Amino acid sequence: MKVFNEQHAMFRASVRSFVEREVAPHIDAWEAAGRIPKSIWPRMGELGLLGVEYDEKYGGGGADLLTSVVLHEECARSRCASFAMAVGVHTDMASPHLYWTGSEALKARYLPAVCRGERLTAIAVTEPGGGSDVAALRTRAVRDGDHYVLNGSKMFITNGATADLYLVAARVAAGDADRRHRGISMFLVERETPGFVVSRTLDKMGMRASDTAELSFQDMRVPAEHLLGREGVGFYEVMRVFQRERLVTGIQAHAMAERALEDTIAYVRERHAFGGPLADKQVVRHRLADLATLIEASRCLTYAACLKYQAGEEVVREISMVKLFSAEMVNRVAYDCVQLHGGYGYMREYAIERFARDARLLTIGGGTSEVMKEIIARLLLP
Ligand SMILES: Cc1cc2nc3c(=O)[nH]c(=O)nc-3n(C[C@H](O)[C@H](O)[C@H](O)COP(=O)(O)OP(=O)(O)OC[C@H]3O[C@@H](n4cnc5c(N)ncnc54)[C@H](O)[C@@H]3O)c2cc1C
């Protein structure tokens, strides 16, 4: 499938070079620290890697969706999925709320710093009481003069401990049955706002270089002009940005899996057992062939959805399938690649061990596999 042009190829080479020189050497230190140093963001801004699709008048690159695909593939190839996730949250999961629904004044004020990497963004939707049922969220926003007063808490927020700007979902109207969805609004919140608290940084199984936090809002006064879009449309905006997030997850999944497969092929060539390299054993070769086929299927499904998305077509069904298939695929690849590494696959010093822990998140974050099946089934059986 021919998808990319010359410009995309040049962009790919520059992102790859950045990742090899400025990300790969630091992965172990970032994993141990549980966070990525803030200095990486202005550097990525300087290289034009943040806001690649945003309008140039806000400091963006004015490029197409496929340029973002290249960015996320190359970040995910880094063997540090948590770095790729932190980037994806900033560029494609949090800041689009501002770009798509923020007022002109808000965009002019904040987007240039977002594109320069001077202000890192986070998206705060999930709450301690639940993430799958977004319409049930309980954080309240009450209008008081020219402010909204927010009270509530958010859970599992990527970039949560280190961000500067938070895109927060809160309920403005009471949550009775038919206003469940229509009562939700999105707000842009500055970290320095009184009442904003990072309650704790969470300790995770994988994705350890990316910080994940629980947040709490205690009588947090947010200027009314920081409401994004109209009051009550927040749920639909969260769903719109979810499409983007799920597409990016699909891109990251096949790029992560491809790198793991490359590492595993290199390993089975080197490793000898029963008088020859593992790579000569038919059972090993067939297993690798299965994995390569799964990865290719995932890539094709994702690229096809990207092209439809770029053409402005309705793609909820396709994107839900991408998220479901790619997240399950990367976990199958992780299981088999660890197995093919034998005992070394279980050791921290091998990148494949980190890959397996990181991959586990993909069937959970951004909408679980079960939720994806619900969406697909609802479209199949209306
Ligand atoms: C590392 C990490 C980073 C994250 N980053 C962010 C972030 O930046 N911002 C943010 O807002 N959120 C973030 N999340 C939250 C993530 O999106 C949620 O964890 C996810 O949506 C699932 O919600 P939950 O954890 O509350 O699980 P629940 O909704 O409680 O679900 C628990 C289980 O029940 C299943 N289930 C739920 N409903 C149904 C149903 N109707 N039918 C069948 N099964 C069902 C689920 O599939 C799951 O298996 C992150 C999570 C993690 C772990």
Image: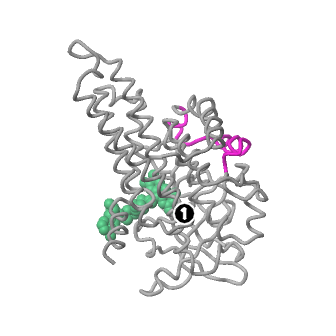
Tell me the quarter of the picture where residue 132 sits: bottom left
Relative image position of residue 269 (x, y in whole percent): 35, 20
Figure quadrant, ligand 1: bottom left
Colour scheme in the image? one colour
- Residue 196 visible in rendering: yes
Relative image position of residue 84 (x, y in whole percent): 53, 45
Residue type at mark 1? Ala
Q: Does residue 370 show up magenta in the picture?
A: no
- Residue 214 visible in rendering: no
Please report the residue visible at 55 percent of the width from the left and 41 percent of the height from the top: 75
Where 4 falls versus 93 (above or below)? above
Where 14 falls versus 102 (above or below)? above
Please report the residue visible at 72 percent of the width from the left and 72 percent of the height from the top: 103
Tell me the quarter of the picture where residue 374 sits: bottom left
Provide the secondary structure element on which disc 1 rests.
Answer: strand
Q: Which residues are magenta?
A: 29-50
Relative image position of residue 351 (x, y in whole percent): 43, 31
Where 148 falls versus 53 (above or below)? below
Relative image position of residue 179 (x, y in whole percent): 48, 85
Q: Which residue is mark 1?
A: 124
